[in-house]
Amino acid sequence: MARAFLSLDEGLKTAFIAAQEDSTVRWLRAGVQEEKAIVLVSQGSASPSVQQDFDGLQDALDSDSPAILLFREAAEGAGSGKWLLIAWVPDVSKTRLKMLYSSSKADVKEGLGLGYFGGEYYASEPSELSYAALLASRDTTHDGDLLTEREVIQKEMARQARDITAKSTAMGVIPFEATDELRRQLEAFKAGAVNWVGMAVTADGAIGLGEARTVDVKSSLAPHVDAAEPRFYLLQHGDTAFFVYSCPEGAPVRLKMTYSTARASVVAAVAAAGTDCSKSFECGGPEEIEEALAYELKGVADGANAGALSAAADAPLPSKPSRPGRGRGRLTAKRP
């Protein structure tokens, strides 16, 4: 059965958002309605014991009916914490329901915010709805006491990023809004007035314009790339528009986290201005953009040549060569 791509009911979204500010909520139970939407069925309160609440899930579920559970693993009063997505799919369930609920996990996570969930758990027998069974399914090696101060900061930053992404996604809004100036230059890029647009996250959390200009694509692009901080760039090279994410290795960790979170919003702003980037790639700063772009252009040329050869004769096509030089650049052939 193919994935059904179910929509999330507004009631479930609202309850999930509210639960972020209300640590007395331990779990939310959701169900599939008419094979079209995922709706909120019920919710449970948190006691001081996470283990006790998890073990009590057996009483909150039907022994023969599947369900999706969002379970908060943090202790009461310890903040929003991370959520565990539980798929309860009893063995006695009908085959179609088993497949429907198993595949609906992705719809829930994408609809509420992928980054906010700390893991998944699948249970098909009552005995598996116990905290002991959950722990047994995990690697119980904990190294919290061995973390450096830097690693502790990074973990806290990641938690904060999950909070922002989850709430924004569930509410159907974009976390970072583009400034009016940037929107105008994105329209200019679409119209061909400029072929290079740099974008940066501003101090107040907006997506601002770094620079917009016409560059000579046959000369070095390195002078236009920030060497110290992450940036997003749009480049028009011939008939191909490239979306570039530059993240220097030595950039502050906090900025790396911010830009990683902002990327989806930047892509949405570019798309809203009418630009459909057919290629995207990442690089580690000005010293890598030339090599990464050359590799992408090689792929574009190979694709065009392969198409011409295929049309002329039914002959084996040459495979794409390995990337020359260092392996630092992270390249993607899909759209951003």
Image (cartoon, rainbow, N blue to C red):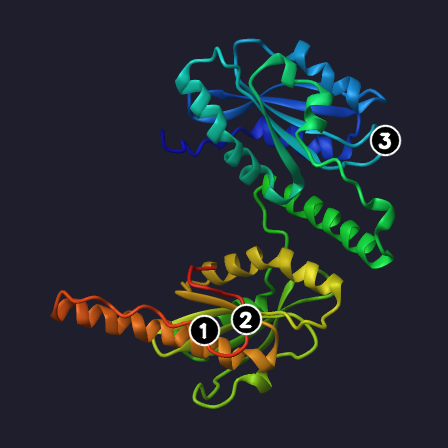
Q: In the picture provided, is 208 more to the left or to the right than 95?
A: right
User: Mark 2 belongs to which amino acid?
Assistant: Gly
Residue 54 is situated, as x and y percent measured from the top left of the image, at 73, 20
User: Mark 1 belongs to which amino acid?
Assistant: Arg
Residue at 40 percent across and 63 percent down: it is: 276
User: Mark 3 belongs to which amino acid?
Assistant: Gly
Residue 311 is situated, as x and y percent measured from the top left of the image, at 14, 67
Q: Disc 1 or 3, which lies upstream in sequence?
A: 3
Label 1 element class = loop
Q: Hey, which residue is sitting farthest left in the picture? A: 313
Front position among marks 2 and 1: 1
Q: In the picture provided, is 161 more to the left or to the right than 153?
A: left
Question: Picture quarter containing residue 47?
Answer: top right
- Establish if 71 lies above or below 157: above
Residue 15 is situated, as x and y percent measured from the top left of the image, at 66, 28
Residue at 36 percent across and 33 percent down: it is: 2
* Mark 1 nearby-residue class (10 Å; few <14, some 14–19, many ≥20): some
Give 61 or 202, whichever is nearer the viewer. Answer: 61
The residue beneath circle 1 is 323
Residue at 77 percent across and 50 percent down: it is: 155
Cβ atoms at labels 2 and 1 below 8 Å apart: yes
The residue beneath circle 2 is 329
* Mark 3 nearby-residue class (10 Å; few <14, some 14–19, many ≥20): few
- Establish if 216 lies above or below 107: below
Q: For marks 3 and 2, give the CA distance.
A: 43 Å
Question: Picture quarter containing residue 294?
Answer: bottom left
The residue beneath circle 3 is 77
Label 3 element class = loop
